[in-house]
Amino acid sequence: MAAPMKRKHEHGDEAYSCNKKLAGIEVSNRGALNLFIAWCHENNFQLSSKVTVSRTGSCAQYGMHAVEDIAAGYCIFQVPRSVLLMPSNSSIENLIKPENSKLTSTNQWIPLLLTLLYESNKPDSKWVPYLALAPDSEAIDLPMFWEKTEVEKLLKGTGVDKAVERDLKMIEVDFSHLVLPFFQNAEGTIRTEAINLESFKRMVAFVMAYSFTEPACKSTSTSENNGEGEQNDSDEDEDENGNEKTLPPMMVPMADMLNHITKHNAKLTFGTEALKMVTTRAIKKGEEIFNTYGQVSNLHLMHMYGFAEPYPNNTNDVVEIPVHRLLDAAKERASGDGTELKLVDSKWETLLKQEIIVEDDVVVLGRDGIVNDDICMQVLKVLSMNSSEYKAYVENEGWSDDASEASDEDDGVLDLAHISQLRDAQKMLLKRMGELHLQDYAVSFEDTVKKLEAAASLPARERFALYTSHGQQMLIKQLINACAG
Ligand SMILES: C[S@@+](CC[C@H](N)C(=O)[O-])C[C@H]1O[C@@H](n2cnc3c(N)ncnc32)[C@H](O)[C@@H]1O
């Protein structure tokens, strides 16, 4: 993306009137966009005259608009691979390469972050016109910069709160264990006084909200993308540990100027010589050009990009419900002298021991029902067994052959349309799981709905947090209704 620009949140030209210190030189933001566009022309971006880049009328600061009607399948611009900002295109690569396996031990982003820190402190970097437009330190308003109390107040229960907690811990460790030692050992690259935890955190946010990841396999090389590679389940796309293979992220100047909506009208394709932004449908003069950042939920959008779409616009939305809510639901139903409670605990231990679940697993609920239905169904089956069924299950060390075969028939059984066919005990558990999770949100469903009436007048943080909670609460309500049916 890029076009990280000097974006301030307030509107109006005065937002650009200040100067930015980059690589030891003063860059006026007035005209920075023109310099960037001129740089794109010099570098063979083949930017179409049918579009314009500006802050006027776009959904979030900068954006791209059609100034003429554009047909489907039209290339709006290309980004030659030689100008992608990534380690292999930077002179710092020879220092990163020998250390690559250590640097990527916790995440794949460190080499790009080091490259960005290096290039943005280099007066003669070839990306000066691009980096001059990089968002100002306050402009990327991701929840990881909010006060903890505000995250709790606005996002509790959504999963964004947990993701922020994890990020902050990891950023501190990466900075002190990898980034700082790297530059201390790489004398003459950048002055170590130029970097600190805060500036590193800002760079992480820039990579989070503006980088792209190319799909690992050829078959997805024309897929929609931004921020993360497209999901792909084929074994060929998994590493030896069964994790999805992804290529390291990179900065793609100009492509990162585009905003995202689920009903996008353009997408980035990955060719051998260049990446191309291609329209996916005909676009009318005046319309904003929207890329896709992938098939992403509001949880992901809020966490990585600091915005969310109002219900029902995000058809990729999901809610991640901690699997232990099923345990809580089962415990609530246990009655009597404690024998039933012991049975529930024993079932849970067995599920963990059999590695059907791990403690922090989540049940993923989407528009059509439970996405990870195989795991969820196994948990439901074990938790809803009576004591003799459970005894047989334990003696058999899992499902009998008959039961395993039956489990193949479970495919799709946790779709909303089929949930009513579950056993009553299983429906009750699912329903209660939803009810318990609803209680975890900072704002109740009823209050969320009330607040939505005035959403347009709310500050951006509150509005997007509200969209995130509301979308998730709607999915849970649908599950509860399906279980009651
Ligand atoms: C890749 S940048 C897109 C360009 C950005 N508008 C700019 O001026 O730099 C991603 C950021 O744009 C904003 N954004 C993108 N799509 C949006 C949308 N549909 N609604 C609100 N903000 C959006 C978010 O702040 C996000 O972090």
Image (cartoon, helix red, strand yellow):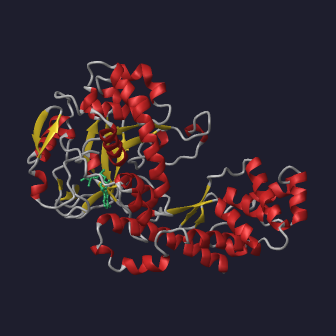
Q: Where residue 33 sits: x, y (%)?
A: 14, 47
Q: Residue at x 45, y 36 (%)?
A: 173
Residues 428 and 242: in front is 428
Residues 397 and 64: in front is 397
Relative to residue 218, is residue 401 drawn left or right? right
Can you say which quadrant of the picture contains the N terminus? top left
Q: Quadrant of residue 337?
A: bottom right
Residues 451 and 78: in front is 451
Quick check: 182 above or below 410? above
Quick check: 54 above or below 227? below
Relative to residue 1, is residue 475 drawn left or right? right
Q: Where residue 428 sits: x, y (%)?
A: 71, 74
Q: Is residue 354 visible?
A: no
Quick check: 451 above or below 390? below
Q: Quadrant of residue 436?
A: bottom right
Which of the four quarters of the rendered structure image does ligand 1 lie in? bottom left
Residues 106 and 482: in front is 106
Q: Residue at x 86, y 60 (%)?
A: 390
Q: Where residue 92 sits: x, y (%)?
A: 31, 23
Relative to residue 213, is residue 430 drawn left or right? right
Q: Is residue 71 visible?
A: yes
Q: Residue at x 76, y 47 (%)?
A: 353
Can you say which quadrant of the picture contains the C terminus? bottom right
Q: Where residue 30 sits: x, y (%)?
A: 8, 48
